[in-house]
Amino acid sequence: MTDVQVKELQIHATNVRKMALEAVYSANSGHPGGSLSAADILTYLYGKEMRVDPKDPKNPDRDRFVLSKGHCSPGLYATLAEFGFLPKEDIKTFRQIDSYLQGHPDMKGVKGVDMSTGSLGQGISAACGMALAAKLSKQDYRVYTILGDGEIEEGQVWEAAMFAAHYELNNLTAFLDFNGLQIDGDIRQVMNSTPIDKKFEAFGWNVISIDAHDFNQIEAAVEDAKKVTDKPTLILATSIKGKGVSYMENQAGWHGAAPNKEQYEQAISELDAYLNELGGLA
Amino acid sequence: MTYQLGEKVATREAYGNALAEFGANENVIVMDADLSKSTKTDCFKKVYPERFINTGIAEGNMLTTAAGLASCGKIVFASSFAMFAAGRAFEQIRNSIGYPHLNVKIGATHAGISVGEDGATHQCLEDLAIMRSIPGMVVINPADAAESRLAVKAAIDYEGPVYLRFGRLAVPTIFDENYKFEIGKGVVLAEGTDVTLIGTGLMVPAALEARELLAAEGISARVVNIATIKPIDRELIIDCAKATGAIVTAEEHNVIGGLGSAVAEVLCETVPVPMLRVGTEDVFGRSGKPNELLAMYGLDAKNIAAKAKAAINLK
């Protein structure tokens, strides 16, 4: 990827972060921390990688995306808005009584959402079903999902991990947003799931460890996954919860809390400063 | 595949046979969680091995993977024992299949106390209640092999989630080849004027037998088969209430939440007439031979007839 392309993606990702915060601030509820940690992965997938078209969101040959950690819907909705699936002005209706932007993604109501999620551990299974469907129908689309690091404490994730390896779902790439924090604190203290890479390797996956905020590393990992012929790939993406907003970074308290007016304005001004630096401020 | 009147066949057998018979459609996928020999999905596997998916003993993953397949246009039958499909995977069914209204058919076998010797852990007596409570879920409990065959065909043709309930015990075939099954429609099997016996599943032949016991005492009982617990046939139930003035329901399920509750909901909002329920009385089952258990828990013609007389006395 050229430096210019990286910069373009960084601008998109910053816009995504701003809109994710706008959603949570407008709703006065929602999940900013994990939305911000996953923003670069979401941006790469929708902005560079996936074969999707906002004008034809149900095309049977499109790549699929499942937000297994469905509570990070502000990040997903912001990404869909940034790339033309929904009007940007709808973002502020998030979680309101008359909005289609539900607290957790609803595939029936939102253009571009391929699976309803929210109950942890299930999205990866649904992604397995989509990947298997491609194999059975001899279609070449790929399936992407993002897991939370707390989410993998759900036993169903490991049922799905066994399944994906057993059926050699090499068209499935799962990102694990490894920000190290869950609601009750450090994942190692709440319920230690490390070493995550070794566990997935033992389950028969191709595992690649990257920095979740480095677009060149994301690209290299995604391209590497495409070369694997007989295994699903886990991209263990070490991230910063709340990435991009100084007072939210690495704070478990921002898992599911909304900023007040002052905090929101500070966050936007920090992100705008970064946008300005990138030359992307409108 | 057709079944002779009176021929004893388990509805799970008919389920497996029907999957093989109607499974030619390339989009039909059958999943099982290591119970294919018991659920009889192996009948499908023999004919279409490339479209049979074993998930191993992981029902939650099976039901959610089924949702993913269905989101890509597949018609998925996901099978396990009723206890582990409706019970263990309830939340996966509710959130990943019911909420997005995906085209998944849950083929649940070994429902009810007639599972027999395996005992209470495997005798699901709550599945109708919990599946019925999911918005948009169709719930079908066929009475015999012939009706099971047609229910599978109807489920393939219907777009949306369906819960199909089958049994392990061989039960007499009561429908002939002229029977037309329709989702949401009950059928009057025998006319009568004093009381209506509404049965579902293997309690339908028991209700027909109860009608004979009552006739011997000069009581005229209508017998109705309700295979579709949801959406329930309101018109037929209202008609029965008006025509006979008393109702008895009979199901191989807890009296809480299943057919009896569904019928009571209709009656109390429309034509409230005396009504009594036959089912397990809010208790767990136990090990034993299927017919011994059915008699011990009052799931037989004798109890239906007794309840019918009691319901008539309440008029």
Image: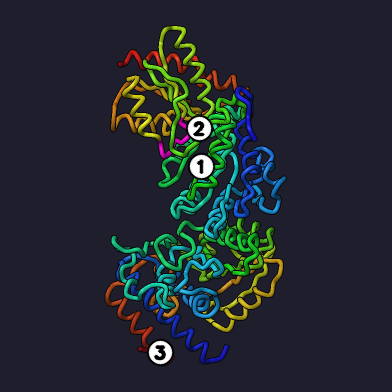
Residue that mark 2 sits on: B125
Start-end of magenta stretch: B226-232
For the residue pair B58 and A183, the one nearer the viewer reads as: B58
At 36% across and 67% down in the image, what residue appears?
A: A257
What amino acid is at disc 3?
Answer: Gly
| B6 to A153, vertically: above or below | above
Q: Residue under mark 2: which chain is it in?
A: B
At 58% across and 47% down in the image, what residue appears?
A: B77
Closer to the observer: label 3 or label 1?
Answer: 1
Mark 1 or mark 2: which comes first in sequence? 2
| Residue B48 spot, x, y in % from top left | 69, 49
What amino acid is at disc 2?
Answer: Leu
Q: Quadrant of the N terminus of chain B?
A: top right
Rendering quarter of residue A210: bottom right
Mark 2 near mark 3, Cβ–Cβ under 8 Å? Answer: no
Q: Residue under mark 3: which chain is it in?
A: A
Q: Residue under mark 1: which chain is it in?
A: B
Please tell me whether residue B228 belongs to the stretch shown in magenta: yes
Residue at the far front in the pictured view? B178
Residue that mark 3 sits on: A280
Please tell me whether residue A56 belongs to the stretch shown in magenta: no
| A158 to A275, vertically: above or below | above
Gap in angstroms between the C-alphas marked 2 and 3: 62 Å
Mark 2 and mark 3 on one chain: no
Find numbered disc 3 in the image and state the secondary structure of the residue it sits on.
loop
Count of all numbered marks drawn on residues in the image: 3
Q: Answer whether residue B236 is visible to the viewer in this image.
A: yes
Find numbered disc 2 in the image and state the secondary structure of the residue it sits on.
loop
